[in-house]
Image (cartoon, helix red, strand yellow):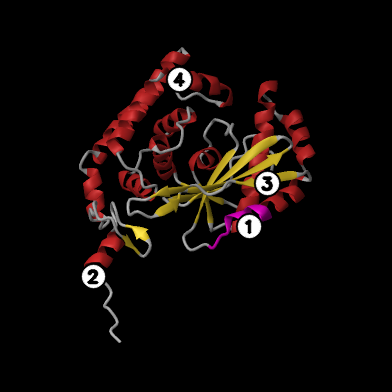
Amino acid sequence: MYRLIQGLVARNADVNHERLPLLINEAIQLVIIKGMQEYYGRTNIVFTGSTSLRFGHKMQRFIEDNTLKFKLKEGIEQDFDADMKCLCERLQKALEIDVELSVIREDKKRRLDNGFFVSFRKAHFLINGESFTVCLYHQRLGETISASPYDANKMGKYEQDFLFEDMDSTFAFVMMEAIGDERFSAYLIHDMTWCINNGSRVDPEYLEDLINDEHLSMLEIRFDNLALTLRSNSTLKEFEKIQGSIIEGCSSKPTLALQIKDCTSKIMVDASGISKLFDSTFESKREAKLGFVETKGLDQEVDGKNVIGFGKKALSELLNPSPINES
């Protein structure tokens, strides 16, 4: 099938030669998406982020880094390592080519309540020298839509609809990525602007849910950093480099410099309004809402966990110790 895809793209794609690798990669992305949907079940898996924007909402840019993002419905049992091994075997059969798999060790981060969490899991599939990444996010779902995956070059036939997060929910997810802990990508400039141009608006309540799931703190600083990042020379240079994967621009301005300025201005208008909801009082309100009580200075362990910081369960144990069994 891999050779068939190469041949179909070469014969049918009405584009310049430089975009042929992007078209081939997108056809492989569709095969992976279809394999994931079949493996997890049509109603259990939901695609998010740039994957949702491209294949669910027909965003006009290629996913050049070949990263496919998804979530699973709550309650779906999964063993990521085992799942990815099965998916790798399916891909090898479907593509009729060797596929190498490497699963990235989970990255644990500290939570507000002194526990740890894993924000996402990643697996890399090496196909004919090209790396494709599948990324599972452990965050609550937004609203969803059901759609046949966008197939711009009619490379395959998809009879079943897949689930994608709707555009407002996806926009909130992308905004969370932009202020999150990962390195800022210039693709986010395009994706956020594209959402705005298509009438999407971030749902503040859902964005707050994502922020809490990701355990992000210092929100005021994060939004300030976003503004600085959007204006930095290094970001603008990176945005200039990715133009080859953008099929349809997000601005009608005559020069790239003016287009970038137009895009970043639109993002900042939206982000500025949202950032006011996450001012200096947000942290304390969130801690109170979630039931965290400040217990700094208590150099003690409860159930083997240090209780310095915010420890609701630990503090409860301290205030209500288990009765001593006198015998």
Dot 1 amino acid type = Ala
- Tell me the crowding category of disc 2: few under 14, some 14 to 19, or many 20 or more residues within 10 angstroms, Cα based: few
The residue that disc 1 covers is 82
Q: Residue at x 27, y 35 (%)?
A: 220
Q: Earlier in the sequence, mark 4 or mark 3?
A: 3
Q: Amino acid at mark 2?
A: Asn
For label 1, the SS is helix
Residue that mark 4 sits on: 234
Question: Closer to the camera: disc 2 or disc 4?
Answer: 2
Q: Earlier in the sequence, mark 3 or mark 2?
A: 3
Tell which of 311 and 258 is nearer to you.
311
Residue position marked by numbered label 2 in the rendering? 320
Label 3 neighbour load within 10 Å: few <14, some 14-19, many 20+: some
Residue 76 is covered by the magenta coloring:
no
Tell me the CA gap for discs 4 and 3: 33 Å
The image position of residue 145, as x and y in percent, is: 48, 49
Residue at x 69% of width, y 40% of height: 126
Q: Left or right? Give the position of 60 relative to 154.
A: left
| Residue assigned mark 3 | 101
Residue type highlighted by circle 3: Leu
Q: CA distance from mark 1 to mark 2?
A: 42 Å
- Snapshot quadrant of residue 38: bottom right
| Disc 3/disc 2 C-alpha distance (Å) | 49 Å
